Image: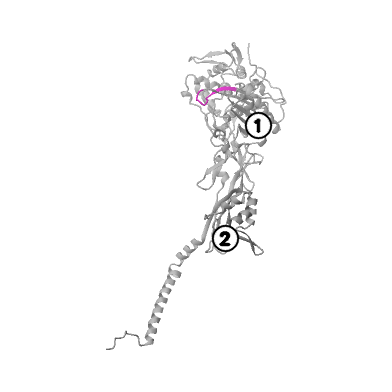
Amino acid sequence: MPSPRAPRLADPRLRQRIIAAGLLLVLLVFAARLVMIQAVNAQAIAETALSERLVTKEITVPRADIVDRDGVVLATSVQRYNVGVNQQKIKDFTRTEDGVVVASGPVGAAEILAPILDMDPDELGAKMVGDSTFSYLVKDISPETWDLIAAEKVLGIEPELVEKRIYPNGTLAGNVVGFMGGAAEGSGTVGLTGVEAAYEDVLEGTPGEITYERDSTGAYLIPTGVQEEIEAIPGDDVVLTIDRDIQWYAQQRAQEAISETGASQATVVVQDTETGEILALVDSDSVDPNDPSASDSDDRGARSVSTVFEPGSTAKVITMAAAIEEGVATPLTHFTAPYKYTTENDQTFTDSHEHDKEKLTLSGILATSSNTGTVQVGELMSSETRWKYLKKFGFGETTGVGLYGESAGILADWDQWDGRQKWTTTFGQGLAVTALQTSQVFSIIANEGLKVQPSVVKGYQDEDGTFTARESEEPKRVISKSTATQVLTMLEDVTQDGGTGVLARIDGYRVAGKTGTAQAAGADGRLTSIVASFVGIAPADDPRIVVSVILRDPKTEIWGGTTAAPVFKDVATFALQSLRVPPSTSEPTLYPTTWK
């Protein structure tokens, strides 16, 4: 029997219909899909595609400058480049001349770039070998050097633009300017000390951003594509009150004082009496912000506003001012000052040198720096009253000078004073202050009883040159003009023959001031350290500046009148000449220091 055959479509037209129906079905599927893409899901798909082509990058601006009062740059930002290599791409690098390959791969690239980077070709070439897509070759090169590298057009050599903070004047005012360091959430560095830290927001500005559309390769911007930009807002330059020349001289003189006296530290403050502006704020061994790690940690900030000490006899000024203001004494009031004096609560105090009983006026007590006399003046007032004057003169609170890490000092409430502290506070012990707080006391006397907020920042200047003054507190009256004038005259007695500040005299200028010598806590926490000081006002007949000199642990002598006063004389002389302050034209009318 014949085998059965498979069925087949005998009609060709039927086969054509089936094929046509199949094709139609496929077309309908594609059409439906096209409708879904172009009509139903068109917006979502377009948005997804656009988002894949869009790139958003942050726009940064260089950190603004810090300048002195005359616009001299103390801190600025410059562009630098780090140079890296794509080790995979550089394998394909070739350079031809007249159709001949003259350099290729890492070895050839190294031969070309080594002279520019002043590197050994073999060492440079070794850094180019590997499979990394980015490996550093060199860091911190100038834009000019990068331009030379870029001109060679070496495949795989890639730049990384970075910002570097530099300090053109090195250690000059380094304690005030501060320095940078530390990560700011991965975005660079931030100010760690000084003005760099205190005015971070002012200097840094606000970043912007740019969003643009790139092609499918990711390499090119699409000119007609989306482009949106939020402009970056530059920071403002911070203008300091510091006078570069006075700061420089005071720093040099402070270092000389350490050599001359064997002191471990020296601090100098020069302040404009009327404005409160700090013309110089000096801490010996000041940090170089370009290399802060080279300094001891204790020398990296501004000890002048952060380190406290017992001021000693310079604080007697407050006791005298309080007595006059309260009406319990005048500069001519008579006192008998023995070498040793015991209070009603059996606390005994002595003067610095043994002597017979002395008949001193109030002015004489200040001129000779008598502790026993000062305690007697304190007995004329309550502890609460004397505490209030210490507070009014600024002890126990920050000055608001505008520096990071300022200390308020230490001043216990009067009702917490023990039986001895009740009296030691009359002559500057049993409390602690900063060098700037000490300077502020004399600035109040020089400024006719008004306390003007001290400042190291004059204001801010934007990129258009518009200057905005820093806001400061309104001046506050601490004592009357009459009391301030009387105390100022008493302070002139200190620099006359028989006073403790003779070595502070300046030829041609009348000088008022006060010496100080106080015990201070040493490294062991005990009173094994000495602080010697002199704070002066010049010219005394028309005050322009206050200069404070603080020496820690002088070895030649411990007295402020012999160690600190000569430094005051030199710094004040330089400052008066720099500021072109005319010499005094009158002779002082002084109070008698003794009575019969």
Q: Position of residue 360 (x, y in %)?
A: 61, 14
Judging depth in this view, the residue of 27 and 293 nearest the camera is 293
Snapshot quadrant of residue 330? top right
Residue 524 colored in magenta in the image: yes
In the picture of the structure, the residue carrying the numbered disc 1 is: 252
Circle 2 residue = 92
Rendered-image quadrant of the C terminus: top right
Task: Determine whether 572 is above or below 49 in the image.
Answer: above
**Image quarter of residue 44:** bottom left
Above-or-below relation of 108 to 292: below
Residue 103 lies, in percent from the top left, at 62, 58
For numbered disc 1, what is the local secondary structure? helix
Magenta span contains residue 184: no
Locate residue 563 relative to residue 309 in the image: left or right.
right
**Foreground mark, 2 or 1?**
2
Q: Can residue 60 be seen in this view?
A: no
Disc 2: CA contacts within 10 A as few (<14), some (14-19) or many (>=20): few
Identity of the residue furthest to the left in this view? 1
Q: Between 55 and 239, which is closer to the camera in this rendering?
A: 55
Q: Give the quadrant of the N terminus.
A: bottom left
Q: Is residue 558 above or below residue 295?
A: above
The magenta region covers: 516-526
